Image (cartoon, rainbow, N blue to C red):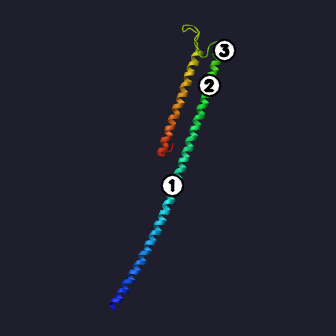
């Protein structure tokens, strides 16, 4: 009988070990599923936060760009109004606004100061237009780099 008792004891021990091992495996699987679920929720929250931050940065950059465009357009309108006023003054003085020095001699006693001013103002307008375009490019590149780096302005 001792052999039979040994077999029974070993069978009971093996069954207990199997039940205990199954319990540990199921508990571990449950913990793994809970961990995966928790990690997935954390990753989704991080993705949502990143998407929201990207959208906020995009909205801020769009608003800044719209403000710059409005300021540039206002400056262009101001330049055009001043240029129109200078042209009106030149016409009133009997001069051609397209060629403010036409009909004037360089050695004449009365300087063509309004024509010279108009020419300078036209050059200034061209320079301002070019500078506005360059500023848009620089601001766009800076915004792009900030977006890549995730830096605050």
Which residue is disc 3 drawn over?
92
Q: Is residue 60 above or below residue 100?
A: below
Q: Residues within 10 Å of mark 2 (few under 14, many from 20)?
A: some
Find residue 59 and report its horizontal and vertical position in percent: 57, 44
Per the image, label 1 sits on a secondary structure element best described as helix
Residue with the mark numbered 2: 80
The front one of 59 and 108 is: 59
Residue at image point 50% right, 63% down: 37
**Tag 2, which secondary structure?**
helix
Q: List x then y, in percent, for residue 92.
A: 66, 14
Near-viewer residue (114 or 25): 25
For the residues labelled 1 and 2, say whether their Cβ atoms are less than 8 Å apart: no
Q: Position of residue 6 (x, y in %)?
A: 34, 87
In the image, what residue occupies the spot 65% across and 15% down?
91
Measure the alpha-carbon separation of dots 1 and 3: 68 Å
Q: Is residue 24 shown left or right of residue 97? A: left
* Horizontal and vertical percent position of residue 76: 60, 28
Residue depicted at x 53% and y 34%: 136
| Chain-order first, disc 3 or disc 2 | 2
Q: Which mark is residue 25?
A: none
Task: Tell me the crowding category of disc 3: few under 14, some 14 to 19, or many 20 or more residues within 10 angstroms, Cα based.
Answer: few
The label shown at residue 46 is 1
Q: Earlier in the sequence, mark 1 or mark 2?
A: 1
Quadrant where the N terminus is found in the figure? bottom left
Q: Earlier in the sequence, mark 1 or mark 3?
A: 1
């Amino acid at each position: 009988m001792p052999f039979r008792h040994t077999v029974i004891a070993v069978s009971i021990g093996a069954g207990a070990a199997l039940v205990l091992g199954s319990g540990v495996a199921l508990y571990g699987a449950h913990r793994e599923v809970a961990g995966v679920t928790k990690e997935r929720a954390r990753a989704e929250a991080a993705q949502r936060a990143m998407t929201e931050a990207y959208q906020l940065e995009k909205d801020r950059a769009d608003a800044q760009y719209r403000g710059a465009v409005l300021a540039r357009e206002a400056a262009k309108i101001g330049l055009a109004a001043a240029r129109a006023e200078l042209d009106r003054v030149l016409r009133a003085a009997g001069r051609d606004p397209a060629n403010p020095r036409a009909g004037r001699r360089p050695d004449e006693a009365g300087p063509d100061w309004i024509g010279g001013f108009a020419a300078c103002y036209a050059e200034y307008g061209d320079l301002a237009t070019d500078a506005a375009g360059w500023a848009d490019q620089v601001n766009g590149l800076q915004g792009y780099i900030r977006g890549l780096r995730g830096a605050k302005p």
